Amino acid sequence: MNPDSKRFFRTQMIWMVITLGMSIAISLVVPFPYSFVVIIGVFLGINYFMRKKQLRMMGMGGMGSLFGGHERAVTFYCMNCGFKHNERSCPRCGSTGTRIV
C-alpha cells in the first residue's frame, strides 16, 4: 500500500472515531428524540467541513466551484503554429489540431 493510501485511511479512521465519540457524548447528554436530531446535524456538519477541506486541498476552491463561481477558462494550444488561445480552432491559422493546456 502506498503512503498516500495509508495517510488517506488513517485520516478516515480518525474522523470516524471523532464522529463516533461525539455521537456517544451527545447521546449521553441529550435525551433521545433530541439527541438523534443533534447527532444527524453534527454528522452532516462534519461531512460538510471535510468536503470543503478536501476541495480546498485539491485546489478547487470550496463550494463556490460547484455552482460555477470560480471556474477557470480552458486554454488551448495550437499544435500547428504554437499559438495559445481560448477558442476551439486556432484564430491564427484555422487549425483544429489543438491540445488543452
Image: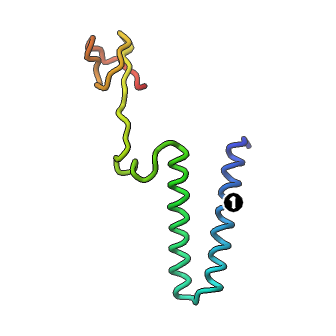
Which percent across, then down, holds residue 28?
65, 85
Q: Residue at x 68, y 43 (%)?
A: 4
Q: Amino acid at mark 1?
A: Met
Which percent across, then down, holds residue 16?
65, 64
- Give the image quarter of residue 35: bottom right
Which percent across, then down, holds residue 97?
35, 17
Quick check: 49 left or right of 79?
right
Secondary structure at badge 1 equals: helix
Q: Is residue 60 above or below residue 26?
A: above
Quick check: 15 left or right of 75?
right
Quadrant of the frame with the N terminus? top right
Q: Residue at x 50, y 42 (%)?
A: 59
Q: Residue at x 51, y 68 (%)?
A: 44
Q: Is residue 80 above or below residue 84?
A: above
Q: Is residue 28 above or below residue 9?
A: below
- Residue marked by disc 1: 13
Q: Residue at x 35, y 51 (%)?
A: 67
